[in-house]
Amino acid sequence: MVLTLRWMLLCLLATWLVTPAWADPGLTRDALDRMQETLELRLEEGALRAEDLSPALLVSVQPRYEESSEWFAVRAIEVLQGVLGDGSLRLCEACMAPRSFVEPGRMTYQAGPISLAEVVRLDEQTRGSAPAARSAIWVEEHRSGVAVRIVDLGTGRVLYAQNLDPLLTELKRSRKVYTMTEELERRARGDSLTQAFVDFALFPGQHLSIDWTEQWGKTNSNLSGVTVSLFDPVLGIGASHYRRVEFFNILVGGKLILSLPTAAARSIGDNDVDVIDPLVTAAAVGRIPFGRSNYGVVLSASTNGEVGIGVSLMNITLLPVIP
């Protein structure tokens, strides 16, 4: 009796936890719009060539949900027709149906996934005097959008394959992973990743400096390098270290700067002489970038009593005003 009761409770819990997958026509329609925009961009930039695609044979248009079955195929055809142009798209209704082939002494019945050879054979049987199809296209609806695959019928080469959703989330995720792969390969090669900063903190105090730092660490969140000060101290050289914070990619850190005039005076004279600035100056620095630009706000405070706010130029080239 106890076991039966437990089994009933488990069944009820499983029924409650398993929620059905509901269709969202809005997601699918937006994903088809992204598909059109993405394919048009690939054609414009040359990643896809019209001469490799047209004429194209639409092998399969497969909706996932009952709510999408009435309109999904029509909308997918509209999108592909808009991308490829009038007269460049053919529909192969026989491609996904059970197929029978009769040859001398042999009859073949095929009901599974269609091969490229069969696609070519069906195109030959139905196109008449029209030119042979160059590519085959598969479009399927999935939970968060659509999946599209385009294959060259002559070579079997995949020309384009992508899962697309309304916000291109998977595309962004793929690019992030690719960037991570590039970064891991860079570390394995031992290549440097150098960042340059020019700080103009002019109000109310003044701090002008140039930093060259090497980005390092497991997540590239540390930047260490050398700094040259042009004010506070007036002329100095030293070391700097920063840490990147996820919040707005803020950099926080500090510098230890040796005053060159004071060091020169002490090397030839009295060891207690300070020329304009003390021998060593410590400065705390924070940088807040403006979005993805090469500019940002810099905040500085030094042991010389100078506190300032101004502009930081990051990874500049040629002139300070050119990013």
Image (cartoon, helix red, strand yellow):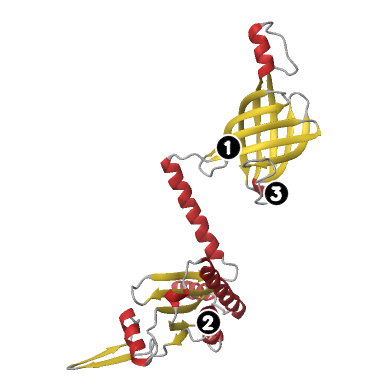
* Callout 1: SS: strand
Label 2 sits on residue: 85
Lateral position of residue 11 relative to residue 258, left or right: left
Q: Name the residue under label 3.
A: 290
Residue 82 lies left or right of residue 256; in this view the side is left
Q: In this view, does 229 lie above or below 5?
A: above
User: In 3D space, how far apart are the residues under numbered discs 3 and 2 (Cα atoms)?
Assistant: 42 Å
Q: Nearer the viewer, mark 3 or mark 1?
A: 3
At x 38% / y 87%, what residue is drawn?
95
Observer able to see residue 108: yes
Q: Which amino acid does label 3 sit on?
A: Phe
**Residue visible at 59% across and 34% down in the picture:** 212
Going by the numbered disc 1, the residue's amino acid type is Leu
In the current view of this chain or complex, which residue is farthest to the left?
105
Q: Distance from label 1 to label 2 (Cα)?
A: 51 Å
How crowded pointer 2 is (Cα within 10 Å; few <14, some 14-19, many 20+) is rated as: few
| Residue 298, quarter of the rendered image | top right
Rendering coords of residue 64 (x, y %): 50, 81
Find residue 59 and report its horizontal and vertical position in percent.
42, 83
Three-letter amino acid code at the position of disc 2: Gly
Question: From what the image shows, is residue 293 above or below residue 44?
Answer: above
Residue corresponding to mark 1: 223
Q: In the picture shown, does residue 93 fall above or below 39?
A: below
Q: Where is residue 83 in the image (x, y as percent from the top left)?
A: 53, 78
Number of residues whose C-alpha sits closer than 10 Å to that of mark 1, classed few (under 14), some (14–19) or many (20 or more): many
x then y, percent, for residue 68: 55, 84
Eye-nearest disc, 3 or 2: 2
Whichever of callouts 3 and 1 sits on the residue coming sooner in the sequence is: 1
